[in-house]
Amino acid sequence: MKYTSLLLSGCVAASFLFSSCDKKPPLTSTVDITVTDGLTGAASAGATVKLYDDVNKPNTGEAPSYTLTADASGKATASVAYIGGYYVVAENGSRKSYYNGLIPIGIFKTQSEIDSSPTQTPAATIGSVKFKDTNGDGVINDSDKTHAPNLFLEAGQTLTYSTAVY
């Protein structure tokens, strides 16, 4: 709303309130996220996709801004408020795309694979999640923690993103 004062006939002042009836709806973007099973490459039907508006929220247990569910083809689509970006975490049962700061890259299948991979704590076992050595020091620890993947959006854009759960 805008107030405007006018000086009329030398000394008389009048104030008018101008209100716009053409309010614009909030800007939105569309996210189209595909979740796959990192082991098989198959669609991760029923996966939950959480979109957070703050880098810290995926690690603090705070509620996400949006929670989506992947359909039978592993796709989750929604129109979201345009805020520039969201941090995304996908889960399907105990499998995740992000583990409290660590990025999964697979599952250990053999002892030789464990032996040739960076050391991680807790110790890797056949069938456990393999994490990305983000700093390249050969050890998976707190120094490898990073924020959840960020989707950078533009107003009115449809952003297509794929992730895998391990």
Image (spheres, rainbow, N blue to C red):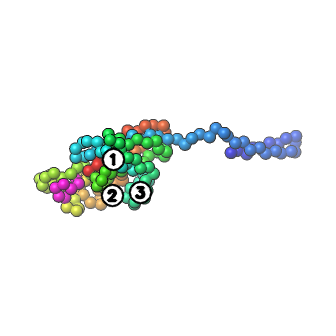
What amino acid is at disc 3?
Lys
- Which percent across, then down, holds residue 70? 35, 44
Task: Report the span colored magenta.
Answer: 124-130
The residue located at (52%, 41%) in the rendering is 27
Q: Which mark is residue 100?
A: 2
Q: Secondary structure at mark 3?
A: helix
Residue that numbered label 1 is attached to: 46
Label 1 to label 2: alpha-carbon separation: 21 Å
Identify residue type, mark 1: Gly
Q: How many dots with numbers?
A: 3
Q: Which of the two discs, 1 and 2, sits closer to the camera?
A: 1
Look at the magenta stretch and give its main secondary structure. Answer: loop
First in residue order: circle 1 vs circle 2: 1
Mark number, residue 5 = none
Q: Is residue 128 magenta?
A: yes
Q: Amino acid at mark 2?
A: Asn
- Is residue 60 at least partly visible in the picture? yes
User: Residue placed at 35% from the left, 42% from the top?
Assistant: 71
Mark 1 or 3, nearer chain start: 1
**Residue 57 tag number:** 3
Q: Quadrant of the N terminus?
A: top right
Earlier sequence position, callout 2 versus callout 3: 3
- Can you give x and y, in whole percent of width and height, for residue 109 in the image? 16, 51
Label 2 and label 3: CA atoms lie apart by 10 Å
Label 2 SS: loop
- Whether residue 161 is visible to the viewer of this picture, yes or no, is no
Image quadrant where residue 63 sits: bottom left
Residue 31 figure quarter: top left
